Each structure stands twice: as structure tokens, then as C-alpha cells.
Amino acid sequence: MTIRDLPSAERRWLAIAAAFCAALSLLLFGADFTVDGLTYAVRVETGRHLYHANHMLPNYVWWVLQQGLDALGWAPRAVITMQAFNVIFGLAGCVVLYGVLRSFASVTNSSLLILLIFFSFGWWAFSHEPEVYVPALALICFQLPWLLDSQKPGRWQLVALVALCAATIGFHQQHVLWYFVALALLWRQAGSIRDKGLWTFALAVPALVLALYVVIGLQHGAFESTHSIAEWFLGLAYSEDGGVSTHRATAAPLHRLALALAAAGNLLVPWTLVAQPIWVIGLAALALFALFGVLLWAAWSRREKWAELRWIAGLALAWLLVYFFFALVWEARNVEFMLPLLLPAAVLAAIVLGNHRSRLLVAAVAVLVALNLALSHVPDSQVPLRYSLALAVDDQYDLTLGDALITEEKNTVLYLNYMRGKPVKFIAGAVSHAMHLNVATERFERQFRGQIRRSDRVFTLEQATRGRLYWMAKRLPWVSENSMRDVDTLEERLYDRLIMSEVPGLENVWQVSLPHARPAR
């Protein structure tokens, strides 16, 4: 079902709800950014290094949009342009997805599922970031009405499907998996392997994606050697030293599975729960338990209806499992690789719920939406503490190229680089080592001390901004790359024998110096 197939009264209410969600989203822009998001924003503003092997198109699209705003005489920082684009695109995807869910479920249940997706931690966080994930999923949503229809798409619909599928892969290489799902849906419609439309799609999408990579690759000299060609097409899945590989996959299978399940759950409830009071954690757990309980009861009570929709339900389940398996192998703990699971999960949930009525479902969705808005937005409604302290250090000391900051997360330093144009260096501390760096602790300590000695001045914010990663490393050590069970002990070892003094005017911010370091400026 498409939006045009809905009754006029329902379309009006949908337009009002979409306008409200758009206003709320644009008013509640997050002020916390990922490392990648800030890096992309710099590239869009400078117009250099726009390509990324795993996300070929987004920076080019954002750059064109930014240039258009410049031409109109209204040019916000690129990070604002990119956030606004993502919010609008993400909302448009949810509106189209609502029409799809209405093919299987009632107005109430479809609305609840869309609210749960749009205000879920995963969708909300990444649609408010200068990131690549939500626009790619919106492109998939735009394809679903044609692919889930019982009728074959017409000629121009097929052309649009080819373009949208190729663009989806261009936005995020992970969605080469979506190509196979879309192909299976078209095969279901065609009813024959010999269908011309099916073969047109099957050949045209890879050809378009290949052309995109070749054209951009030629511009950037990516075809100079066998290694450079492999690296260009495989991106982070290839390194000249190790060949084809996964990205930070955990060795132990059960450990990896636990991380993947935690990341999938993090789509609905944010990691910030680990630093919240026990009653908040309990409330979230009850809401999730109620949500899944309602789905199981609805599946059992409507079991006779499954025969009519078993093909779509089976394909949606296969779609979900394929993406889950990819994330399990590629990088189990990262929620962004689990984000595509929201779409097949929504289709499955709509099929399960149908016209099933449940006040418990309404309550569970309301609690999850409220928790996600509070925990995702409130900590980021102002400049986060670690950013504020970094800006304060710069205000007092006028940081320069020879200076360095020790912080929990690299995006603190990149925020200073982006907002102030300060080329201060990043030094990974104890928390960064535990959560991100798959390096032996002894080797990390040597690198840490070497970086300090090569810096004019070093400031550490690590002990002043106990954030999400610190609490995760302390309370959930199995989530970390190195299973670091005592971050505080590592901090003591790192700062042992270093001369530290409190920076005047800044509470708990430390300036670190060594007798053999170059003189401070």
C-alpha cells in the first residue's frame, strides 16, 4: 500500500503527525557527534576527499547541497546542513514505511510501530548525526511499496527501483545485502526466473554501482595496483597487510553473539542506560518485556492468519537474519550495523499484530519513546561536558599544533578541530584503549608515553569527564575490545611518574608535562 491508497482523512492525520515530528526533530538537534560525522563535515566544507570506499555517495550529495545553500546566500556549517538532510530524509522514509505497514496492520498498530522506529535510539541518534546510515535506510523504504505489492512494477517504476537500489549501496556498502532481498521480492512478483524485468534489475544495479566506483576511482587514482583496486572496492574489508578481513570482530563466538544481541537491543534503548539509576534500567526492561510479550501473544492468537502471509513473513525474517549475521561477523557490538534490522522487524511486527488491540502495547511504546527522547537528547541538548572543557582549555591556553588532549573519545578533539579550527592532537587514554584499541596493553603504554614526549603540552580530560564509555568499561567489561576489567588501574599506570597539576580555573582538568618534553609555549 502507498500513501495515495490511504483514505483522505488518514492522509491528513499522517501529514499533521509528520509535521509535528519534523518540528520536534529540527528543534532537538543533537550536539554530540561521531568521529566519522565530524570528519565528513570537514570534507564537505573543504570539498576535498569527499569519497569514502564504504560510503561512496553521501559526501558528494551533501557537498552539492551545501554549495546550493552557499549560492542562495544562506550557508550554515556543514554539520547543520547534513543533520537537517538526515532528519528530513529519515522522516520521509518513515512516512512511506507507514503506508507499507498499513498493508498488514491497523492504523493504531502501524502508527505505534512507526513511532517506535522514528523515536528509537538507533533511528533518532543517527538521523540527528552528520552520518550515512539513516538516508540509506530511507532509500530502502522508498522501494518497499513497489516491491511488496502483489503486482509487478511498471517500466518507470522498475527504472526508479534500479536507481534507488544502486543509490542505497552507494550510500552504504553494507546494503549490497539489500540487493539480494530486493531481487527475491521481484522474483516473487514475477513468478518466473525468465521475467525480463527481473533480469533488468539483476544486471542494471551491479552495473550502475560498478560504474560509480570506476568513475570516482579513476578520479582518485585508485587503480594503480592490484592492492589499490582491492582496497578501493572492498574498503575497510581489505588491508594490504592482511588481505580480506572483518572489522574489529571479537574472536570468541559466544562473546561476539552476546555483543551482537546487545547492539540489536540498543536500537530501542540507548547505551546511556548503563550510567542511569536502577529504576530507569528496570523501567526500560519492563517496557521491552511488555513489547515482546504482546508480539508473542498476537502471533499465537492470530496463527491461522500466518498461512496467507507466510511468504512475506519468511522473506522478512530472512532479510533480518542476513543483516544480523553480517553485523555478527563484521563488528558485533556497533549499533549502526544493526540499524537495518528495524525495517524487516517492523514488517514482521505488522504482520504479527494485524488488527490486534493491546493497551499494553501502547504503554510499552510510550515508555520506550519517552526514555529514548530523554536519554538521547537531554545529555546532548547543550554542548556535552567534554566538549565544553576542551573549549575552556583552548580559551585559557590557546592550543596549537604541538599540543595534545587525552580524552575518552576522539570526537572531543575533532569537535575542537571543527568548531575552532584548532589542530590539536588526540592521545588515546585508558578508556579509549579498553573500548576501541585492539592493541596489547604493554604496547599501548609505550605508544602513550611516546606521544606525550613528542608533544609540547598535554592536557588530560579523561578523569574530568566520566562519560558513557567509562561506565561501560567499568560495568560491562565484556563489551570492550580488550576485556579491560579495571580502567582505573590502567589510568594509574599511564599517569604514574607524570607531573600533574590542576589547571587554574578549570575543575579537574590536568596539564601533564615531562622533564624531557619540549618546553611549553
Image: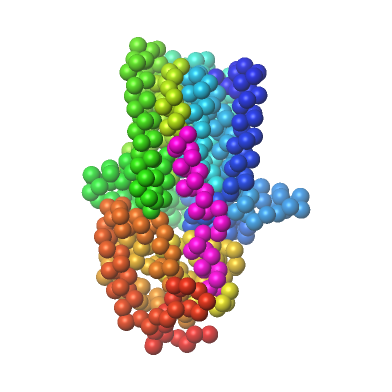
Name the foreground residue: 116 vs 99.
116
Compared to 91, does 315 lie above or below? above
Left or right of residue 134, residue 300 in this image:
left
Q: Where is residue 270 in the image (x, y as percent from the top left)?
A: 42, 46
Left or right of residue 403, residue 483 in this image:
left
Name the foreground residue: 7 vs 385.
385
Compared to 227, does 301 lie above or below? above
Q: Main secondary structure of the magenta part?
A: helix
- What residue do we see at 37% from left, 62% from top? 432
Asked whether 367 falls inside the magenta stretch, the response is yes
Asked whether 196 falls inside the magenta stretch, the response is no
Residue 206 seen by the camera? no
Q: Position of residue 119 (x, y in %)?
A: 50, 38
- What residue do we see at 33% from left, 43% from top? 262
Quadrant of residue 286 within the rendered picture: top left
Compared to 163, does 155 lie above or below? above
Instruction: Count numbered badges in the picture.
Output: 0
Q: Where is residue 127 in the image (x, y as percent from the top left)?
A: 54, 44
Q: Where is residue 39 in the image (x, y as percent from the top left)?
A: 53, 58
Left or right of residue 309, residue 252 in this image:
left
Residue bounds of the magenta highlight: 366-394
- What residue do we see at 33% from left, 53% from top? 248
Quadrant of residue 300 within the rendered picture: top left
Query: Which quadrant of the figure contains the N terminus?
Result: top right
Residue 259 seen by the camera? yes
Q: How is the image coloured?
A: rainbow
Quadrant of residue 399 within the rendered picture: bottom right
